[in-house]
């Protein structure tokens, strides 16, 4: 009984965990876009997150350099 439940539920937990993590990333992206501290007044531009994985790398970045195409380089 326990063994059959373990086999049946071993795929459900990772799927629900994946859905939870993706939901949190989506909410973080929304809050990043709405953050008034990330507003650049001279260009009248707000932060526009391009993907949901950006918040994972923010804590690990020390220096960010844009090149001539405005691509950010770590």
Image (cartoon, rainbow, N blue to C red):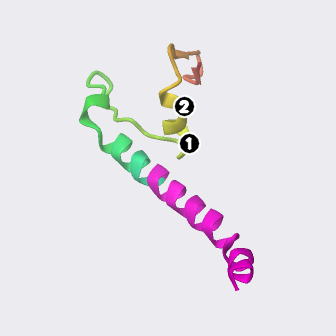
Q: Which span of residues is magenta-colored?
A: 1-25
Callout 2: SS: helix
Instruction: Residue 2: say if magenta.
Output: yes
Q: Which mark is residue 21?
A: none
Give the residue number, with chain letter if any, for mark 1: 53
Furthest-bottom residue in view? 1
Callout 1: SS: loop
Where does the N terminus fall, quadrant-wise? bottom right
Give the residue number, with chain letter if any, for mark 2: 57
The relative height of residue 29 versus residue 47 in the rendered view (above or below) is: below
The relative height of residue 37 versus residue 20 in the rendered view (above or below) is: above
User: Whole-Å distance between the Cαs marked 1 and 2?
Assistant: 7 Å
> On the rendered structure, is 61 left or right of 30?
right
Q: Main secondary structure of the magenta part?
A: helix
Quadrant location of residue 11? bottom right
| 18 or 64: nearer the viewer | 18
Q: Residue at x 54, y 22 (%)?
A: 70
């Amino acid at each position: 009984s326990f063994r059959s439940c373990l086999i049946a539920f071993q795929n459900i937990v990772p799927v629900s965990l994946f859905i939870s993590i993706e939901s949190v990333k989506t909410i973080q992206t929304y809050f990043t876009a709405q953050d008034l501290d990330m507003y650049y007044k001279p260009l009248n531009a707000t932060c526009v997150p391009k993907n949901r994985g950006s918040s994972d790398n923010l804590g690990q970045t020390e220096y960010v350099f844009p090149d001539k195409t405005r691509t950010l380089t770590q």
